[in-house]
Amino acid sequence: MNCLKLLWGLYSIKRNERKTYTQIQNLQEKKLRKMLQFAYGHSVHYRRTFEAAGITKDHIESAPLRAFPTLSKAELLDNFDELITVSGLTQEEMRRFDAEETVDRKPFKGKYHVVHSSGSTGKPGYFLYDTPAWNCMLLGIIRGALWGMSMPQILKLLACGPRIVYLAATDGRYGGAMAVGDGIDGIHASQLYLDIKTPLSEWIRQIGVFKPNIIIGYPSAVKILAELVERGEIHMKVIRVISCGEPLGSSLRHYIETVFHTQAVNFYGASESLALGAELDPTEGMILFDDMNLIEATDSGIYLTSLYNFAQPLIRYHISDNLILQKPETGSRCSFLRASGLLGRNEDILWFTDGSGHREFLHPLAIEGFCIEGLLDYQFRQLSEDAFEMLAETSLTASRDVIRTEMLKQMRCILEEKKLSCVQFYVRFVDEIQPDPKTGKKRLIVKEMQKERVCS
């Protein structure tokens, strides 16, 4: 996509931000019915499952979305070849392409973009984007990265020559790395990729030469960069920070914004749809891109329906993210839905069992109410059915005694409220919380159930 076409597309998609809530709902409904009709007419899998649910072509325009069958990851993997609408492609071909070809942004067969999930929730899956879907997604990525900016402000930024550093896992066909690279190319910006496994000495050297003014990356990686700035090992003048790939807690957001003297954008995406939402102001919540996706929230996670990817339709696809949907308040600048309670997967929940066999959970994001000065990062390690510890990473000048006292005090209140007073909780300070070597992302929950213990 050339620069002029990209800018026109960005202008067009940003106009949706000014639509009313009713207009957005009507737009979403129109796109949904188009996707449902297309999937029924071009996907063997969807035609079969629709008809098994009693939905024929005549019903598609009127049947409520909840009447359509859901799609799990296992079902996607088992029925991949019949689900996609591109003839002549198979999942096995995509696996060979992923395994044998050099990891770069070269399209599969010259026109398809293949994204694989990190496998953090099980067996890795593949997601196929054709050129129209990929270009639509790129517009969503750029809009999210520049959320809150008007078109004149965006044009001024681009005229000044953005210099973007990307800090994440870059050694796989990950959607974030591929999309960021293509988006940067589209706006003719300079770019520097730094893999999270690259030695810090190389980070310091390359950033010193490149002099980026925009940072995109995992919040855990951005935090490391902020620490280098705070210690005076790197000097940067940053105009925007975009956090992606991991949850961004309020304490870490505050630290990053303080060090870099700019707002951080908390970007929400997944391999299934790389542009789901963006959060610039935490008081507003995560703003979902309702013009690109339709999200249903349930107790077991969300159901995602992509409204733009016709090559691999995803209709009511289950993702185990936990969130609560909220309508925009009257007078809001944007009429898209908000998501609160984001972002943790169901796998990132601590479950405990008492002596009577009663089970209760503790969501780790409950700690986000702490916002303790000097607490930068954390990780939960479940040790047994009635005990967990929290690894805590602090700033260089923080008082660990003060942080420990406050964490214990506030956590006891949370446990009492959840009727989990019998659960034991420990704080252990570490110099650095390491990312998972397989994915390059920091795991929020690590379960080390080595002992069989119950509450007494």
Image (spheres, grey):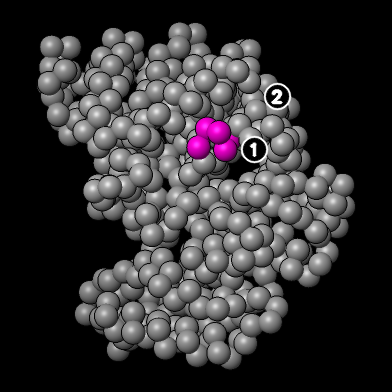
Q: Dot 2: within a 10 Å radius of its alpha carbon, few (fewer than 14), some, or many (20 or more) residues? A: few
Q: Which quadrant holds the N terminus?
A: top right
- Residue denoted by label 2: 101
Q: Position of residue 374 (x, y in %)?
A: 59, 78
Residue at 37% across / 30% down in the picture? 16
Relative horizontal placement of residue 226, taking residue 49 as reference (left or right): right
Q: Dot 1: within a 10 Å radius of its alpha carbon, few (fewer than 14), some, or many (20 or more) residues? A: some
- Quarter of the image where one finds residue 61: top left
Relative horizontal placement of residue 196, taking residue 33 as reference (left or right): right
- Quarter of the image where one finds residue 333: top left
Amino acid marked by disc 2: Glu
Secondary structure, magenta segment, majority class: helix
Task: Answer whether residue 399 is magenta in the image.
Answer: no
Q: Position of residue 54 (x, y in %)?
A: 12, 21
Q: Which quadrant holds the C terminus?
A: bottom left
- Residue denoted by label 1: 157
Q: Magenta stretch: give its range.
A: 150-154
Residue at 63% across / 76% down in the picture? 394
Residue at 52% across / 41% down in the picture? 149
Q: Secondary structure at mark 1?
A: helix
Relative horizontal placement of residue 384, taking residue 352 as reference (left or right): right
Amino acid marked by disc 1: Leu
Q: Earlier in the sequence, mark 2 or mark 1?
A: 2
Q: Position of residue 196 (x, y in %)?
A: 71, 51
Image height of 282 relative to 175, above or below: below
Does any portion of residue 236 appear in the rendered image? yes
Which dot, 2 or 1, sits closer to the camera? Answer: 1
Is residue 255 or residue 440 the one in the foreground?
Answer: 255
Q: Position of residue 217 (x, y in %)?
A: 63, 49
Image height of 3 relative to 440, above or below: above
Q: Secondary structure at mark 2?
A: loop
Residue at 26% across / 35% down in the picture? 20
